[in-house]
């Protein structure tokens, strides 16, 4: 039971909806159906996908997490070494049958996209790859973790990813995801430097990284204003993020931990943003 509880914590339950919802909505909008593939895919992106993503991260980040005061709770598990092998085996084994099913029912393109998304999840943290330690690529890969399920859902449904609306929305949400990752990395600058870990925040410094995050949120909002009809109102979801990041414009590397107050708000603002987008999606056609 202890192993199960550690795996649940490691999978970050508070973030499950952030990956399952984009897939489910994208697939449903593309097909208009609630079928077995939607259910299987949504469950995969709800739990196995998150266990794979965060479990691998907790295993390979253990040494640096020991010195990070944020780890060990809501913002990241501190997974003891005795659970590392089991975490890797279980997270891989649990994900495999779902991946096989989704590859079988999908097209060659959707399958390639799914494998790319899964590769990015592993490559972000795994030894010898460690995309999380390559500045800018770390933020882009993190954004792909969340935009990827949506793009896969559209591809699995046979929806074109090259339409103007899909491309604008996708680019906007990539910028949104990169902004969130970059801002989140600011609070760990000193801990990362102590552990000799590079990130977008250690590369650009706290103050510039916060301003880059603000700019990415702003650009994402402006792009969302270009969407047709009521979907323009999705840009409103960016306003709280702009306020939170702007509040930290005076931050320095020495005071980087103060960004944690904004990061904690982001965890709940994600639900606010999801509520706005959900209301737009279920509105009249």
Image: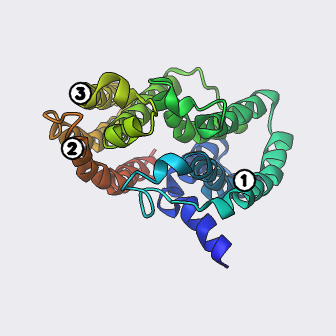
Q: Nearer the viewer, residue 195 or 255?
A: 195
In this figure, which residue is indicated by the disc labeled 1?
Answer: 88
Q: Is residue 116 left or right of residue 252?
A: right
In this figure, which residue is indicated by the disc labeled 2?
Answer: 244
Secondary structure under the numbered disc 3 in the rendered image: helix
Is there a contact, CB below 8 Å, between mark 1 and mark 3?
no
Q: Residues within 10 Å of mark 2 (few under 14, many from 20)?
A: some
| Visible residue check, residue 73 | yes
* Foreground disc of the pair 1, 3: 1
Secondary structure under the numbered disc 2 in the rendered image: helix
Secondary structure under the numbered disc 1 in the rendered image: helix
Q: Nearer the viewer, residue 114 or 92?
A: 92
Instruction: Compare marks 3 and 2 and give the one earlier in the sequence.
Output: 3
| Residue 244: x %, y % from top left | 21, 44
Q: Nearer the viewer, residue 1 or 81?
A: 81
| Residue 26: x %, y % from top left | 58, 42
Residue at 77% from the left image edge and 55% from the top image edge: 89
Residue at 54% from the left image edge and 52% from the top image edge: 21
Residue at 58% from the left image edge and 36% from the top image edge: 124
Residue at 25% from the left image edge and 41% from the top image edge: 256
In this figure, which residue is indicated by the disc labeled 3?
Answer: 211
| Residue 258: x %, y % from top left | 21, 47
């Amino acid at each position: 039971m202890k192993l199960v509880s550690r795996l649940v914590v490691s999978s970050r339950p508070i973030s499950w909806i952030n990956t399952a919802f984009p897939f489910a909505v994208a697939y449903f909008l593309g097909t208009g159906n609630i079928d077995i593939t939607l259910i299987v895919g949504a469950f995969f992106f709800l739990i196995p996908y998150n266990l794979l993503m965060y479990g691998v991260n907790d295993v390979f980040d253990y040494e640096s997490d020991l010195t990070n005061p944020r780890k060990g709770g809501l913002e990241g598990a501190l997974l003891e070494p005795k659970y590392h092998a089991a975490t890797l085996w279980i997270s891989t084994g649990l994900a495999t049958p779902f991946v096989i099913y989704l590859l079988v029912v999908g097209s060659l393109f959707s399958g390639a996209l799914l494998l790319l998304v899964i590769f990015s999840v592993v490559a972000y943290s795994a030894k010898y790859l460690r995309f999380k330690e390559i500045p800018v690529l770390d933020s882009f890969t993190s954004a792909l973790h969340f935009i990827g399920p949506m793009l896969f859902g559209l591809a699995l449904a046979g929806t074109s990813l090259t339409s103007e609306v899909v491309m604008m929305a996708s680019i906007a949400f990539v910028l949104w995801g990169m902004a969130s990752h970059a801002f989140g990395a600011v609070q760990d600058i000193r801990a990362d430097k102590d552990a000799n870990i590079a990130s977008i925040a250690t590369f650009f410094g706290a103050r510039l990284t916060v301003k880059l995050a603000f700019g990415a949120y702003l650009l994402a909002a402006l792009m969302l204003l270009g969407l047709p009809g009521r979907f323009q109102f999705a840009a409103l979801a960016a306003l709280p993020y702009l306020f939170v990041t702007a509040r930290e414009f005076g931050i320095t590397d020495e005071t980087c931990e103060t960004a944690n107050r904004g990061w904690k708000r982001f965890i709940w603002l994600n639900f606010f943003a999801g509520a706005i987008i959900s209301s737009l999606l279920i509105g009249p056609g």
